[in-house]
Image: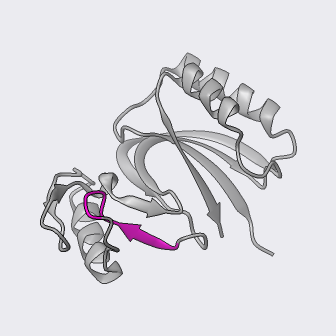
Amino acid sequence: MSDNWIILIPDSPHYVPSKAAVTRAESLFRSLAPEAVTIQATISSEVRFFDCGGNFERILCPTCTTEIDIDWWSDQMSKEFESDYPLGRIQLPCCGTLKALNQLIYEWPQGFARFSLEAMNANIGQLKHDKREELERVLGCRLIVIYCRV
């Protein structure tokens, strides 16, 4: 049996909300997902990559919408990981545009962040738009919602 996670991260990889905001957001998330096995906020000193696990489909260029070769992307991710994800702009192989890895289009959503708010086996389906907006107001940032199946 697989586990499912709802992972909320800021759309800005280096953004970290205040401790008071994190506490309020954890409480709100618990009320939205009362059946969740765990709800946990995490702040790390460096940027981390949050993936969607078995939900992964593909990665697209945000400029020309060409599918990015997974081997090329993996090589770039290795370079980023070795240098703690500076997320500098790199030339994309499809159209030559300069973009950072966090600017690519991930289907299903994935992202980079120092802060995350996660619920395991929440049994709520997809987070409703108005509830995401409420969490964004509490945390003071726009959120990327990642549905991870492991």
Q: How many numbered circles does the render carry?
A: 0
Left or right placement of residue 119 versus residue 100 in this view = right
> In the orientation shown, which residue stands out farthest toward the right?
35
- Position of residue 23 relative to residue 10, above or below, is above
Q: Quadrant of the C terminus?
A: bottom right
- In the displayed structure, 2 sits above or below 13; it is below
- Compare residues 37 and 32 and report the one nearer the observer: 32
Residue 17 place in picture, x, y as percent: 47, 25
Q: Is residue 61 magenta?
A: yes
Q: Position of residue 137 (x, y in %)?
A: 56, 20
What residue is drawn where x is 26% and y is 54%? 84
66 shown above or below 139: below
Q: Residue furthest top?
A: 20
Relative to 24, 1 lies left or right: right
Q: Quadrant of residue 74?
A: bottom left
24 in the magenta segment: no
Q: Position of residue 87 (x, y in %)?
A: 23, 52
Residue at 53 percent across and 62 percent down: it is 108
Q: Which part of the image, by quadrant, shows the N terminus?
A: bottom right
Q: Toward which corner of the image does residue 95 lie, by quadrant? A: bottom left
Tell which residue pokes out farthest to the bottom in this image. 71
Residue positioned 71% across, 42% down in the render:
39
Colouring style:
one colour
On the rendered structure, is 79 left or right of 117? left
Which stretch did the figure color magenta? 57-64
Q: Main secondary structure of the magenta part?
A: loop
Q: State whether residue 138 is above or below residue 108.
A: above
Q: Residue at x 21, y 67 (%)?
A: 79
x then y, percent, for residue 63: 25, 58
